Structure formats: C-alpha cells, structure tokens
Image: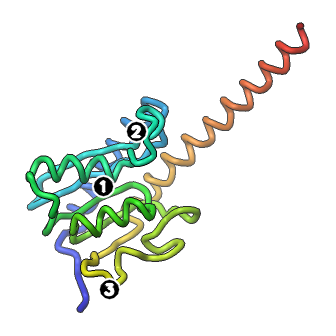
Amino acid sequence: MEKISTLTIEEKEYFMKEAIKEAKKAELIAEVPIGAVVVLNGEIIGRGHNLRETSQNATAHAEMMAIQQACARLDNFRLEDTQLFVTLEPCPMCSGAILLSRIDEVYFGAYDPKGGTAGSLLNLLEDQRFNHWCYLESRVLEEECSQLLKTFFKALRQRKKADKQKEKENSEKD
C-alpha cells in the first residue's frame, strides 16, 4: 500500500519555513541549526529546535522537542494524521520516535549522509516491516536548509582556528 502526500507544494514550503525559523533559534544560542514542526489539520501543534549543547542532553533533538510538545498539546502519544517538517534528515533516535508516535508524513530539507535514517544510511521511516510507516519526502527547501548548516559549521571552524591561534600567541608570550 503506497502512501501519498496530503499537502500542496505551497503548504510544504510554508511549514518548512517554520521549521527553518526554529533552526535559526537554535543558531542564535550556538546550537547546530536544526528545526522541526509538527502539523495537524494545517495548524502547527509542536515546535522544536536543537538543544543538545544547552541542555547537555543527547536526546534534545529538534524532532524530539517538537514531538514532545505536540503530544502534550493533544494529551496523547499518538500523533496520527500529522506531518513533521524538519530541516535535516532524521537520525535513528528521531526516526524511532516518529514511528512510535505514529506521525503519518515526514518532510525534510537536507540529507545527513553521516547519520540520516530516512534514506542516507538506511530508511527506517518507509520500512513496512514495522507496524507503522510514513510517507516520506526529501529536499523540501533543501538549499536553504543545507546553507544554514554549512554557514554554521564554517563559522565554527573559523572560531576554533582563531582560538587556536590566540592560544599559540599567548603561549609564546609566556
């Protein structure tokens, strides 16, 4: 049985832009800029952005934050008939949470070749051996999602290089 998208291109772009806004919130606090939103009947019921560094919690991924907020809003762990938008391909943990919360449709922007489990390393979300599987669509506003990450990591590398240079200069003064 094949699943299909229930959204228009305009809706997909609108909700991905909302996920991008979440990613930018993460970036403002020096977190890796990844954002997510959960949508039900055209309304955002959960928002989240990466908070791993801030919280020192390995599970504080954007998808997990958005799913937790959506579950609290509905007072139900079952998020049937919902869509998840995330700027980066979900990891194994997030893919598991997506399946366990029964999200119907997943849309992501950029692929994660080192950790993605929605097509890069494997595809957990469309694996019909599970009791639940999702409609999956990639590359929604891919360039914008990808550029956020590239810019963030380029700046991080430059900061580390500058810090190393300062450290070297300080040690030469001593």
Residue 79 shown left or right of residue 34 in the figure: left
Residue under pointer 1: 16
Mark 3 vs 1, N-terminal side: 1
Distance of label 1 from label 2 (alpha carbons): 19 Å
Label 1 secondary element:
helix
Q: Who's the residue at 30% across and 58% down the image?
A: 85
CB under 8 Å between callouts 3 and 1?
no
Residue under pointer 3: 128
Which residue type carries mark 2?
Leu
Q: Residues within 10 Å of mark 1 (few under 14, many from 20)?
A: many
Which residue type carries mark 3?
Gln
Residue that protrudes farthest toward the bottom in the picture: 1
Q: Mark 1 or 2, which is nearer the eye? A: 2
Residue under pointer 2: 51
Which residue type carries mark 1?
Met
Q: Who's the residue at 29% across and 64% down the image?
A: 98
Mark 2 vs 3, N-terminal side: 2
Residue 157 shown left or right of residue 105 in the figure: right
Image quadrant containing the C terminus: top right
Residue 84 shown left or right of residue 71 in the figure: right
Q: Who's the residue at 25% across and 46% down the image?
A: 47
Distance of label 2 from label 3 (alpha carbons): 31 Å
Distance of label 3 from label 1 (alpha carbons): 26 Å
